[in-house]
Amino acid sequence: MTSFEKWFYGETDVLNHAMDEAREPDSPDHARKERVKARLAEIRETEQYRERVENSRKEFRGLYLAVTAVGAIALIGVLLYVTACLPEYGAENPHTLEVITRYIEKGLEETGAVNIVSGIILDYRAFDTLGESHVLFTALICSMLLLRLDRKNMRSDHEDYYTVRTDKFFDLSADQIFRRVGAFLVPSIFIFGIYVVLNGQVSPGGGFSGGAILGAGLILFSASFGFEKVDRIFTRKVSSIITLCSLGFYSFAKGYVFFTGANGIENHIPKGTPGNILSGGMILPLDIAVGLVVGCTMFGFYSLFRRGSIGGNGAATGKSSK
Amino acid sequence: MAFIWNFPLFTIVLSLFSGALCMVLRPKAARYYTIIYQCFLIILVSFVLWFTVTSDSQFTYSMGEFPAPWGNEIRGGVLESLVALAMLLVLLASCVAGWHFLKIDIDESKINLYFSVINLITAALMSLVWTNDIFTGYVFLEILTLSACGITIVREVGRTTLAAVKYMILNLMGSGLFLLGVVLLYDFTGQLLMVPMKSAVAAVLTDSESMPALTLSVAIMTIGLGIKSGLFPFHFWMPDSYGWSTPASAAILSSLVSKAYIFLLIKIYYRAVGIDVITQTPILKMLFVLGICGIIFGSVSATSPDTLPRMIGFSSAAQIGYIYMGIGIGTHLGFVAALFQLLTHMVTKALVFLAAPYLEEASDNNIKFIFLQGAARRDRTAGLYFTFGALSMVGIPCLGGFAMKLMYGQAAISDPSSAKMFIIMITLAASSFLNTLYFIRTVIRLYSDPEEKASSERQKLYKAQAENAKRAEGRRGFVIAGAFLMALNLFLGLFPWIFEALINQGLAMFS
Amino acid sequence: MEIREIFTILLLIILILCAIAVNFTKNLLSAVVIFMAYSLIMAIVWAMMRSPDLAITEAAVGAGVSGTLFLVTLKKVHLEDKIVSDLIEIDLDESEEETAEVGEGAQV
């Protein structure tokens, strides 16, 4: 074969290992793995195993497929029928005008936000957004309950916990592409994320979108430069304090607005001139709070998935830190 | 505008903040904070109940300065306060009684996260009870789903993770169907708040021929909530996820979480769509049939397992079937019976799920019946509580279960012309017989002498363990909380007319 | 029909094809990549329906963060090369491995 064909079929590496994505495992436990393999080979010979494999493939399979097919077709049919009965897309439906007209006509003057969507989610129907931020927080807590390494997790012998703890096996920071592109992209993503968060009331964007962008930027930063660099600024304490302060600020600020609004007291929150950055009443601070929470949560998920802790190696020493 | 009107807002917002706060507290501080905070909430909600009952009125509280169809709203009345108070009492009892097993099952560094999730469950339960808006109901339903998965996952045994994954997948499917229903209803009516939605639904129905489409949207929503609360064909996740989670979580899941979904469903029927519209559709008949199937199949399935938690899980499915049968009857008395069963089951199931693990622990952590024989003699308090719960579910007079079945009987004979009367009477008889079959059989097993001799090795081991268990931390909490739940059950059973009057008063102002 | 409507209908058909393809792909890595493509096309559909907030969020979350989390999960459970019909053997493998490691008489 010519050298081009050799490269095309993967038999030579033109880049000479400059793009390898994984290092060698640090301390594999060969003896234990050989023992487990031998025992598994023994088990596979037995009658019981073969029967189990056969049964698990045959049991009720036809019935499950039939019921699934019928259920899926029924659901598709029902949804298609109901959608056909709905009012046409884009047409004006006389029944549904009551709520929408006030949002569109008086949205700007009542909330002070040029972007009516931000006005609706953070002013008219702010209670739902309070719930939604806490949905994300709940998902983070449940991931921490499941994935965070603790003494019970680490007592099992089933994984090579040295590599899991340090996660060096999947470390990508020796990769040339990641370093160079990351050095350029990460600051741009952060600046864009901050721009989207701050401009929620003036242009499309807002807390959730900007927070997702900030989270994605943090993920790229940690993937390109390694976890040590991130752990210097983004430790577990920082993450907890940001989440607690943002969610606490959101709860109490909106609690104050609900309380004064329901009791008929005047809440002295200035609306500002529409179109400025400092406008829209509470929308700007709430956007910042939501953006910070969402960013921390997205990076928290990534960190928990990769190495079982947010920031630092608290679990590696086996001590339970706060 | 009394100051008491603000209390529901406090229960929701402060609970959400407590959830965030417990993440940074130390484990012990998180536990004490949660328990004291729940006592505080019980006081608040008792005031609201007293206020609404004595003034015989309900109040609407707008969240923010914008009035009804444009801003959000919550609403408090007799029925909401009663259900909220019952939920908070059972939640407090579960947290206190389950502490012994929480320490064993959860790693110490995660206990504050567990109590954070309990606070989020409190916020979601309160919000589902007080809400007056369908989309807010969906948002807090999401919080409740995720938190319920969280409290199941926390026990790090292999089977538990499998059960939690099964639970999560089915619940997310239910949430998806519920959201589809909400979106379709919004597209038809243009409203998200429940009271304006009722008038919009009436307007849409008079104008055009959209009854089938509207029925299908409400049916999609009903099936979504039915999947999440354990309606008949979708009940098979119950034995696994209740049986393999830590006892406090099992009590909270089985008594509170499914009830919140059913209460939201009843609220949507009364307030968002209208009972008169619903009775014209075949939705209630479908719920009636599925409820009866749930009772029969759940009870039949409960006779076959050979482990204790699975049996209790299947009996949960049967008891939820009772509530759906009550909703399916469609008359006012049917709803009263369904709501009474909601309260009774909350109290009874928590007691049974909290007592059973102590019996298992007294038999060296075995869950099979052959090892549990005689367990109630080794751990007398847990045996007493379990027997009490079992008798209540069978329907012995003076206990909650008997009053519940009496109300179902009254609802059945109130309409003697329909065929439903015979079906309900036969179902009540058959299910009582089946309940007796598996519950009393278990109780007899628990109290009879073990087959081996009393001096054999295993018996000596059990005796030594029972002595240790009596001195463990958290035992006193279990005894007090269990006695409290027993007292609530007796209260429901001995004075059912009080609760019937409260539920009637609440339903009159519910729509 | 205008070009805009034809384009929207084409995108929606691609969405349906992506959704069906995710189910029928045997290779889990392809399934994740098709899922990210689904999110991307959904973001474009949102933009065509004139909701830019949703488009930004869908692109960042669906095609960005959640795709990345899926890929990390696949890598961690060593499934990036496996195809679906092997999963039954894997399931049995792991439970047998537990028995082999822990020994008999252990209670789960």
Image (cartoon, coloured by chain):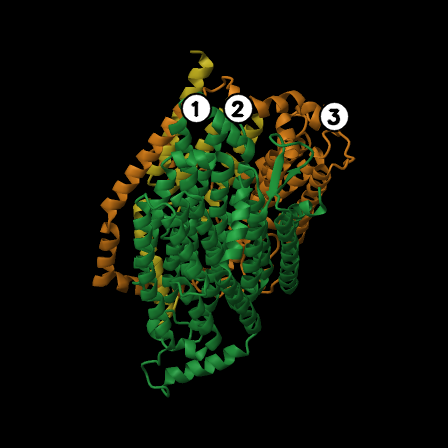
The mark lying in front, picked from 3 and 1, is 1
Which residue lies under the disc numbered 1? A86
Chain ID at mark 2: C
3D distance between C-alphas at marks 1 and 2: 22 Å
Q: Which chain is yellow?
A: C
- Which of the 4 quarters of the picture holds residue B477? bottom right
The circle drawn on residue A231 is none
Q: Secondary structure at mark 2?
A: helix
3D distance between C-alphas at marks 3 and 2: 25 Å
The quarter of the image holding the N terminus of chain B is top right
Give how far across and how far down residue A191 sits, in percent.
66, 33
Chain ID at mark 3: A
Which residue lies under the disc numbered 2? C47
Give how far across and how far down residue A118 sits, in percent.
64, 30
Which residue lies under the disc numbered 3? A276
Give how far across and how far down residue B311 sits, in percent.
36, 62
Front residue of B489/A217: it is B489
Callout 1, which amino acid?
A: Leu
